Every structure is written in C-alpha cells, then in structure tokens.
Amino acid sequence: MNTLPGLLARLADLEKRIRTAVGARRQRDPAPDDPFRGLYLSDEIIDALLEQNRDPAAVPWAGQPADEPSVLPAGLGLSALDIELLLVAVAPDVDSRFEQFYGYLNDDVTRRRATVGLALRLCGLPEGSAAGRSRLGADSPLVRNGLLIVEDPDRPLLTRTLRVPDPVVSHLLGDMRIDPALGPVLAAPVDPVAELPGADVVARALTSGARLLYLRERSGGSGPALGVTGLHALGRSALMVDAERLDQQPELVRPLLREALLTGAGVVVGPIGSGGRPPGGVLDAFSGTDAPLLVYGTTGWDPRWGHRPPLHLDAAPVPAAIRAAVWRSALDGKLAPGVDPAAATAHFTLGPPQIRRAAEAAVLAANADGELVDVKRLRQGARTQNAAGLERLARRIEPGVGWDDLVLPGPVLAQLGELAGRARHRERVLQEWRMRPGGGRGIGVVALFAGDSGTGKTMSAEVVAGSLGLDLYTVNLATVVDKYVGETEKNLERIFTEAAGVNGVLLFDEADAIFGKRSEVRDAHDRYANIESAYLLQRMESFDGVAILATNLRANLDDAFTRRLDAVIDFPVPDQEHRAALWDVCLGPGVPRADDIDLVFLSKAFELAGGHIRAAAVTAAYLAAADGRPVGMLDLIGAVAREYRKLGRLVLDREFGPYLSLVTA
C-alpha cells in the first residue's frame, strides 16, 4: 500500500466491491417496502453516496511517481490478504461515506465500522474461511503488531468490529510523526558519533539478522551513542526509551513496537542498572519481530530475563580524540579564546550524549553572564551531568577553597599536587599507555590522608577536588555502618556503584572505622568483620573513581589497604612558622584587626593544629562583633582559652604569659 494517492486508488477499488455487495443485499432484502427503512439508511441515500465517485486521479497528489516507497515496511510480515483486510478496516477513517456503507451492509446504522464477517466478504472470502479468520487472530501480524484492533470480544467472531488505531491511520496517510502517546517513555534523542569504536560491529550484527543486542557500558562508554551510531550506519532512525518509565507504563510496550515496525526504527532502551532488568514485557513483545531492540546498561545480562539470548557487546570508553571532536562540535563559536575543552575536562568521565548536554549547560551559564565559555563554566557544565543518587548516600560539597588557602609544608603540598595529577592523567597512563595491571582492576585513584585532627585533611581533599573542577562527596558513616551482618557491604556497594556514574571525589572521613585491620578469628563477629574488610579490599581495586580515605589513626588501617593505595600523605602538626601563617590566613583579609594583635606570640605560645586555630579565629570574630569593635588580642586570647577548655587542656601561666589575666579575671 503506497502513500495517499495509492491509498485512495485502493479505496476506489474497495468501493466497487461495496457496490456489488449493496446490489446483492438488495436482491435478498425480504422487505423492500419497509416503512421504517428511512430510520436507518434508505436505498436512495446509498445510491446517492455511490454516485459520489471520488476519482483518485482528481486529487492533487495523483501525479506523483508510481514507484514511491511503501508506508508499510516489509518487516511487518503482512500478506496480500492482510493488506486487503487493513484497507477495509481503515476506509471509514479516510472517507466518511464508508461509515454509512458499512452501516447499511451491517444492517445496523449504529455499527459504522467493518465487522469481521463483512471484511471477509469484501475480500472475496466466505465467512467460514479458516485462512481468513486466522489473519485476524491474536497472533496474526495485523493484531500482534498493533495495526488492527478486533473489538467487542464478547460478541461472536463474525460480528466483532475492526478498528485501525489513529497512529496507524496517520502513518498510512503519510504522517511520519512519532505517536504522541509514547511521549511519557521517550528519552532525549541522541546524535550519532562519527568513527565511534564498536558502531561498525553493531551495524554488521543488525545486517546479519541480529535483533536483540545488549550494550554493556564501561566507565566512560555510552550505550545510547553506540546503538544510535550503529543504526545510523544502516540508515535507520532510533527511538530512545527510558527503561524506568517504560517499566512503570508497560501498556506502552505494544505501541512502541508498532511505532518501530511502521517507521523501520530501532529501539534503544535503558539504562539497566545494578539489580535492574529490562522493562516488563519488552523482550517478549519484540521477540520474533523484525524490529531491532538494543538494550544498554552497566550490569551483566541475566539469562532468566528472556528466552532469546542477546548479542553481547561492550560500550567501551570513548577515545579522547572523539570526545574532543564532540566538545568542539557542541561549542563551535562559543568558546573563549585559548580554551581547550578536551584538555579542561580530560579527567571527567563523560560519554558523547553527556558531553553535548554539558556543553549546553556551559553555554547557558556563559550566556547568562554575557560571556563566552571558559574553563570554569566547562567544568561546571560537566558537573551538571552527575547523577543525584550519590547525594542520598553522601554529602556533596562544592569546593570553595584553593591551593592558596592551604598552609602546609612544601613536601605535603607537592604530594597533593601529584595526587591531582594522577586523577587528571589517569586515562592516558592507565588506558592509552596500558599501565593498568590485569585482574579486573579499575582506573581509580585512591589516597590516604593521615594525621591528627585539625591538620587539614578534609580541607586538602576539598582543594584537590576543586583543582580538578569536581565536587567533593563526604560519605556519612551513619548511612554505611550497620549492625546487621552483610548490610554494611551492601551500603558500601551502593555508594561505589553510584560514585561510578559521578564525576567527583569521594571522601571517607574517619576511614579506620570501616577500613580497619583484620583480626584473628575468635568468634562469629570477628569472622564477619574480616569478611567486610576483605570485600572492601576487592571493591577498592575495581573502583574507577577518585577516593580519599582520611584517618587520625593510620596504624589502625589494614596493611592490605595500604598496598592498594596510590598515595599516602601524612599531615603533620604545624610548627611555629606554619602556625603564624595559619593565624593570618584564618583571620583573613576581611576581618578588621586591632593594632595590638601579636601573631608571633600566638604562634609561639599555643601549639594548636590548623582546625583549632580556625575555630579560635571564628570565636574571636564573634566576640569582637558583639562589642562592635575590631578583633584584638583580648578576643583572640579569650577564644584560645575557650578552645583549650574544649580540648580539656589547662590554661597555664607559661603559655598565656602576660595575657593570663585576660582569661582568669
């Protein structure tokens, strides 16, 4: 069946058959003089309708080439009889006269669609034809693929009504828009990516007859981009479907299949996450059809999901050159001079669709400020692609400090810089240069920050994250540790799984609470505690992100963890020189200072760590603000005394010296 001109020509042929049927009806009409005939449809009305011969040659589209493409793809598996039955059913939706024709032939003015019996007769088949009836059964191509609906299941088969769904009618008339009913489950369209590795394999698989593919996403890979690019190579479009939403609305699976068959598109559905499965019914609905179904996700395929095995393909990490090309394409003419988007975001794990969305977010932010896209906005846009799942398990911190805010010995600062460099260049070293060992190890970077409380571990983690343009996620141990056996491991697995899809730095504060040493097994509690530690050892090796473990008690960590760490950085208690710098930095440039402030005395007399110095500086600022004056030594000495009491330390004359009277009065 061709587009509108061909459809009208076929309807004209159907009209001839209706003329024959009307003539036969009149010959066997037992009551031609029925006085109530006009209450339904009179012979005169039917004659007048039949005289309205709508010649398809009269329509403006009639001059189109006869070899125009069919709107019903061969993949539907329709026979010539199926086409005729579909034509009979669709006629009232194309030409309103057929409603009255069918009402007359059904001998019921209220039934203005073809019934099964009428359709068979108009196709030249007896009502008892088994072959004809089978083409309207539940497993027939017309019904199974949603092209035709057989209504009134409580009536005898021959009097059941045939109806063609509106989207099919629109398609037959040449309207190629996607069925609006599918809107709630459709995901954003994805553009094909030139020279994407693996797309040629997808195309070859589809050409060879594969119709179910599973694209397992690796870190930095994109199942949607791989599926769309493979379909594009074959000239097929793609219907992007959100797996979670389709699972919530399984009644849309059949319309989705119908849309794919009518348009010749492939369906790309996902993501299937850890513990998930394909949306209910989609595997069964697409089984045995010509519609390609490409499922993507991060988990392995479970054979129990369906009886049809898929072709397994990996959506491998996208090479840096292709990511750079996608960035350039998405930001053409919108970048600030000298900005290299690929270099600025090299340490971000993003697939092509995420890059395009990140670029759009960066452009929106730049336009709001009336500027071009710079490195800061690029990284800000990249962070917008982080999934929100990790925020339910960890506290997100947007870094607000930089390298200039750190007061640490030179060697410690150098080690922190090296750690940031590892995170920035890990793809080149571990993947391009193949420096990653086997054994299923990930490309993660894991470091240990060890030192007394207040020595700057958390702040340093924030600075490292900020220098990379990443957010810092602080794991809340209350959401991790559970008294029930096995629950702690499950909670940690959820954190690691969510972190794999997030461009951020994961901080485990007080890490010795969950990364402690394994002990000799004396009872069941020891055995399960050791199992928990063993699980963490394995999970850290397969981690693909950036994680920092902070602890005050380095000696309590298991030696096996230390071996798996990329960096161990010790944070010493600051000496007098660094304490003086810390007092100056913590008071900051915005705090008004009295002339009597003696930072040399404060740094020499009080051996405090940076965290305690900051707390004392804040307390002093509050004391001064309450009296409406600049911060002076009275406030600072009083704040130090309060900090001493918090720490349980004595206020001694040898430490407070000439200022002792300020805190003992």
Image: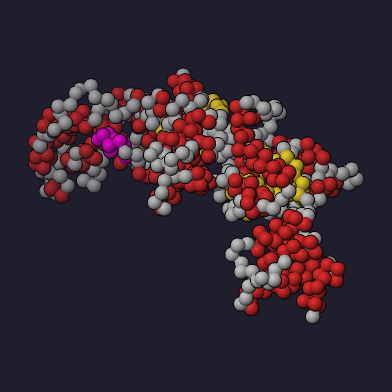
Which contiguous range is marked in magenta? 167-176
Screen quadrant of the C terminus: bottom right
> Horizontal and vertical percent for residue 426?
63, 34
> Horizontal and vertical percent for residue 123?
25, 28
| Residue 493 visible in the displayed image | no
Q: Is residue 438 left or right of residue 648?
A: left
Residue drawn where x is 27% and y is 25% of the image: 69
Q: Is residue 628 left or right of residue 167?
A: right
> Horizontal and vertical percent for residue 366?
43, 49
Indicate the quadrant where residue 468 lies.
top right
Inspect the magenta stretch and tell me whether residue 45 lies in it. Answer: no
Residue drawn where x is 48% and y is 47% of the image: 377
Residue drawn where x is 61% and y is 53% of the image: 401
Pick whichever, 424 or 476, lies toward us.
424
Residue drawn where x is 19% and y is 30% of the image: 5
Residue at the limit of the structure toward the bottom, as seen here: 665
Pick whichever, 631 or 611, lies toward us.
631
Indicate the quadrant where residue 292 lies.
top left
Vertical order, 570 against 323 (above or below): below
Indicate the quadrant where residue 171 lies.
top left
Query: Magenta region's main secondary structure?
Result: helix
Residue at the limit of the structure toward the top, as seen here: 208
| Residue 76 visible in the displayed image | yes
Pick whichever, 233 or 544, lies toward us.
544
